[in-house]
Image (cartoon, grey):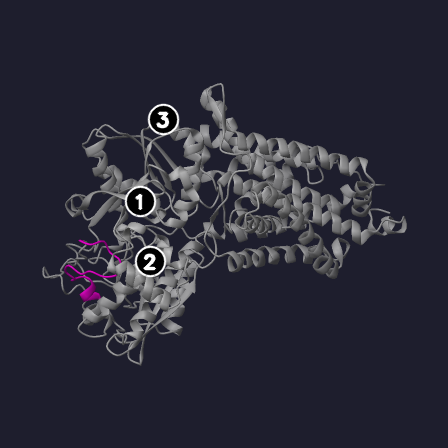
Amino acid sequence: MQLFIQRVFDGLQAGVVYAILALAIVVIFRASGLLNFAQGELAMFTTFIAWTFLDAGVPWWAATILSAVVGFVIGAVLYRLLIVRLGGPAGNPLAIVIVTIGLFLILNDGAGIIWGANPAKVPRLFGDGRVEILGAGISVQVLGLLGVLALLVIGFGLLFQRTKLGLALRAVTSNQESAGLAGVKVMTTLMIGWGLASAIGALAGTFTASQNASVDTNMMQIALIYAFAAATLGGFDSPLGAVVGGLIIGLVSELVVGYVDVIGPDLRLLPGFVLVLVVLLVRPQGLFGSAQVARA
Amino acid sequence: MRSAPHQRAHRRAPWLVASLAVVLAVVAGACGGRSESGGGSGEGGSSTTAPEATQVVDPAADCPNYAGTTGADGATIKIGNTLPQSGTFKVFEKVKVGINAYFQFANAGGGVQGKQLELISLDDAYLPERSRANAETLTQTDGVFALLGNVGTENNKQIQQYFAETQQCVPNLAVATGFPGFGDPANDPWIINGLPNYGLESVAFADYLKQNKPQAKVALLSQNDSFGESYVSAFKQAIAGTEITVVGEQTFDPRSESNPQGQVTSLASSGADALLLGVTSVPCPTALRSIKDSGWNPLIYVTLTCSSKILMDVAGDAAEGTISTRATYDPSDPDSAAQPSVQEFKTEGAKYGLAPEDLDDLNVAAGWNLGAYLVQLLKASPQLDRAAVMNTAYSQTGVTFGMNLDGIDWTTNGAEDPFGYEQLQFVTRTGGKWVPQGELTNYSAQLSEQGGG
């Protein structure tokens, strides 16, 4: 029983990172109907920026928040300078997806050129403490990240459902032309959407770095694969779904690998993706996604 | 008005799946090419090797298109190298930096036989198939004389196979891996180890346990590739017949997870009181951090490749109390600063292009050592001919070079004794640095009990 609880905690620890990166993916999807494959590398890049602040003597918490601000600016600028020129989501979505894959490689190599090949140590956002529950241990770090995650989900839920900005974001995703005619500033709204997603991505980066206690140029690549699985599982247009999906993927991977000998660590990616497949067969829109309705 | 958001989502589904596949392919590229085992047939002689063992290579018999002086018949000696300069294992790019600095240093001193050394290094991102392609470029396009310090076990296996398939007799010198299979001149005399044999490390750890923890219950956590397997299999052989038992065994795939927390949980529950951590690069300090988080407190052996200052700094207090071995001085260790070889590295290295942080980097130091190895080898060779160099490489006695520890005498003797390093110094992580424990120990007897490792 103690071992089982420990594995649940391990699953939450892995899942919290997938969840927040999935949240960034979902926010961009809701705001612009696009997927950004460079989301993980963008997060890595801003984490190095956070590390640069840390190295200059800024406390890690402040560095994290600053990196989120920088992330917001980078996301907005990327949208304005790059994505718009490709015609935006309404123009040529495939071209934009390919561009984000290009960004993936540019950011990875760029970070290597700027910050070098070696990993760097970072502290933990919530310290090294540990809480014992029923004989199993969970770090204060993980509990803290779960708390932040809950706040973000509530925040984004309110943003999308209860604010004018959220309404504008939804309107633009739904139909850019109509939204523009109705007085929504389409360009600004989409810039904000990309900025917000990159800011969350920046948090995902510093969360991951805090978890591993180090930052390196490849830290987000594996997480990105799980995050896409999480977003698919939860539904691409649901912030809550992304988070629940991330935690489920973390738990399932950990428990299946831990208890099913045939799977083992070598097939770690398998259980999560099998689950995604099964859920999509039953509910194509994901656990929390909006059902697809076609107008007659 | 026909595109409600959900419709939009629906409409995008096919390309969404397609592009996910693309990204998965990009990322999973690192998974490719876990090549089959087996040392490749090589071009080498058979078991009829002379007992003198000075003649492991006979080009007249073994190399149909032998070109012994390619790459060394001009004003320069061209040396090729392939290692990761991007990707997860990018830290090893620094090996190239070290080799390059030593070459410049040697060139300033007149080079080798009046010829200047030239290094051509290519990026393989740790992907074995790219190492193979790089070996082809280096030999066919650049026309290098020999390869030096190629990183990665699977990578060198691919290069070995490429040379065998194309029947090229090109020296692959001092490969930067301790894989025991690269010390088998009866099978392939054209490749030789440049790091201590990984098996030697496992033998040393087993020996340490026999003396200090004779009833140890050991957990094994290893990378699921030939790097990890080398440690695990040599350790199991080394504890055969003792009261040391393996109570838990887990593997870790650095390409599909970044944090082995789950494996640590499993191993901790096994009740083990010692751990062999057969993991390298960034996942190694991450694993140490996970172990500390878990509250489990075994005696941990970390591999020599993980004991560098950079990785240990990342591990921080989580590395405290771990043990490891070394064969060379660590330039970042203040206690070694007075050693003449370390001072030479610091002053000459700085003069020939090493940045201040490079002078503390164990991977740079490893590259410097490989460069020093090559220069002494080429000088010792009767002529600048590929076969002569290989025969010299497999018949050296008591050679000292680079920053090897005092007392390390690099000795090889063909198939009978293919590994240069046979002695290791135990070290314990204490107060944020490695402290030597006991004397430099020769493990060649234990290693040969395992059939050469």
Residue B357 included in the magenta stretch of the image: no
The magenta-colored residue range is B390-407
Residue under numbered circle 3: B270
What kind of residue is marked 2? Ala
* Left or right of B393, for residue A293: right
Give the image quarter of residue B443. top left
Q: Where B151 sits versus B278, above or below?
A: below
Give the percent coordinates (x, y) of residue A280: 65, 36
On whether disc 3 and disc 1 are found on a single subunit, the reply is yes
Using the image, determine if residue A7 lies above or below residue B229.
above
Q: Chain of mark 1?
A: B
How crowded pointer 1 is (Cα within 10 Å; few <14, some 14-19, many 20+) is rated as many
Mark 2 residue element: helix
Q: Gap in Å between the C-alphas at discs 3 and 1?
A: 29 Å
SS assignment at label 3: loop
Label ID, residue B434:
1
In this image, B272 relative to B263: left or right? left
Label disc, if present, on residue A9 of the rendered structure: none
Check disc 1 and give the amino acid type: Trp
Chain letter of the residue beneath label 2 in the structure image: B
Foreground mark, 2 or 3? Answer: 2
Among numbered discs 1 and 2, the one appearing first in the sequence: 2
- Residue ID for mark 2: B365
Q: Secondary structure at mark 1?
A: strand
